[in-house]
Image (spheres, rainbow, N blue to C red):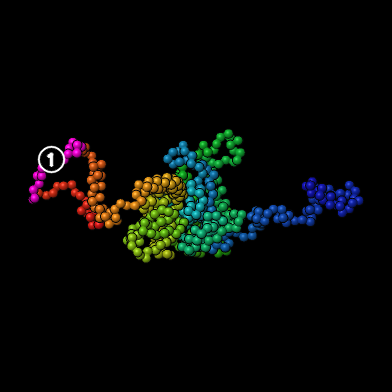
Amino acid sequence: MSVVLNKANGLLRSRYPDITPGRLATRGQLQYFYSKNYRKHEAEKRRMPARAYDKDIKPLISTAATNNFGPGARYEIDATIVDLYLVSDEDPEKIVGRPVLYLVKDVFSRMIAGMYIGFETPSWVTAGMALANAFCSKVEYCARYGIEITDSDWPAVGIPASILADRGELLSRQADTLVNRFGIQLSNTRAYRGDDKGICERHFNTIQAEFKPYVGGVVEPVNGKKRTGKRYELDAELGLSAFTEMMIHLVLRHNTSHVVKDYDFAPDMPNDLAAVPIALWNWGVSNRTGKLRTCDERLARINLLPNETATISEVGIKLRGINYTCQEALKAGWFDRIKQNRPTKIEAAFDPRNTNEIFIRPVAGDDEYWVCDLSDRSRSYRGMTFVEAAQKQYERKRAQASAKQRADYSSIDTLDAIDHIVQRERAKKPSKPSLPASRRLMGIRDNRRDELAAERQRTSLSKPDSASSTGHKALVIDIKTRSEPCLDYPDLDSFLEDGDD
C-alpha cells in the first residue's frame, strides 16, 4: 500500500508542483478514493489471469445437472495418484509405491459407474479399463475380491450417451473408438479448467478422506518428515488387493447411502425422492432415459484397446516386428506359400502390457474378432510388454549391426588373401601352353583319374605297405569268379564321364 501511496503522491506533485506537504494524500484518503471509484470484483478480474478468475472467482449461475437429462446422459472420467503407499501382496515388507485410481462418475445421479485401481500410469489403456468396468456388470468384478453383490446393488451398467474428460489420454486418435464403435459423444474440458468436471474431481478428496484416518502409509504434508522425524512410507500395510477391496466397499457405500448435498432437483422430480445416487439412478432410468445400451464385456475391453495396422505375409501377422498366427487365418489360407489375394494389412487391437496375443477383425466394422497367438518365430517375446519387446528388438539390431561391421572389416583381409592366392597360382602357369587345346581337353578324364589316385594316397588313413614303399608290386592272386559280384571300391569316374567330355 505504501508503494501505491507514494506513486499517487508523486503523480499529484507532478500535476501540482506548488502543493504543500500537508495537502498530500494520506493512506486513509487513498483507501476511501479506491473504494468509491473501483469495484472489488473488477479489480480482482484485472489483477489475476483470466483462467484463474474463471475457475475460482467467476459466479456460478448454473449446476452440472441442469443439462443432463438422466442417468447415462454424461459420464465424467478422471485419474489421480492415491495419497497412500502400498506393499506387495506376496511380500508385506516390500513397499511398491502409490497406486493410480480412475473414477467414472454419472453426472445426473452422482453414482460411481466404474473404476480402475492399479499401478499402470494414466494412459488410454488404463482409461479403457475403467470405461469397460463402467459399461459392464460389476458382479464378477466384486466377486474377485470376495464381495457378493447383485446388479441392483450397483446398477450402473451400459453405454452412456457422452463422456467428459480432461485434455489427457482421451484427447488422442485411440479415443475415436468411443465414437466409432460405441456411438458415444466425446468431449474434453478447457485448458486449466478442472471445474468443468468438478463432480469427478472433487470426489477424489472425498473418498480418500474416508480411509486416511484408518490406514498406515498415508502421504503426509511436505514438512511432515521434519515434524515427525519418520518416513510415512514405512507405515504402509495394505496390498493392492486389500486396497481395492476397501475401495469397493467405499464406492458401494457412496452409491447406496451417501446423501448428495445441495442437489439440484428438476421441477418434475418428486419431493419424497432422496438425493442418494442409487435412488436418483433408479428414478432416472424409470422416468427419463430408460436402460442404457448394453455390450459384451470382453468385446468392450477389446474395442477399448489401442489399434494399429498389422501386415500379413507368409510368416504370419506382424505387429511391431512380432509375428502372430491364428487358427481362423490358417483355415482361410492366408499363410499358404502360393500366389493368392490375401489381405496385406489389417487393423489389430493389442494390450501394450502383454505381447502374448492380439485381436483382429476379419471384416471391418463387424463385432467378430479373431484372437491371434504369438507364433514360434517370435517366441522369445512371450510374457513381455511391448515396450520390453521393442527394447529387445533394439538391442538385437545393435548386435546385428556390430556383427555386420566386424564382418565387413574382416572381409577385407579375406579378399586380400584370395587375391594373393590367385596371383601366386597365376604366376605358376606358363605363358604359352606346350600342348594344343584339343589335346588338353581330351586329357581331362585321365588327368582327373591320376589326380584322384594321388588324393587317395594323400588322404588315406592306413599306412602304405612295404611293397609299395620299396617300389615293387606285391603278388596279387585273383580269387574272383565270373559269377561273383564285384567288390571293388566304387569309382565316381563313370558318373562324371559324360560331364567331362
> Would you say the magenta stretch is mainly helix, strand or loop?
loop
114 sits to left or right of 450 = right
Badge 1 marks a residue whose secondary structure is loop
Q: What's under tag 1, amino acid-wise?
A: Leu
Q: Position of residue 2 (x, y in %)?
A: 79, 46
Of the pair 135 and 191, the residue shown nearer to us:
191
* Quarter occupied by the C terminus: bottom left
Please say whether residue 148 is visible from this viewpoint: no
Of the pair 365 and 484, the residue shown nearer to us:
484
Of the pair 471 and 65, the residue shown nearer to us:
471
Residue named by callout 1 = 475
Magenta span of residues? 466-483
Q: Residues within 10 Å of mark 1 (few under 14, many from 20)?
A: few
Please say whether residue 251 is visible from this viewpoint: yes
Please tell me whether residue 469 belongs to the stretch shown in magenta.
yes
Q: Residue at x 44, y 38 (%)?
A: 91
The correct choice, above or below, for 396 with respect to 71 in the image is above
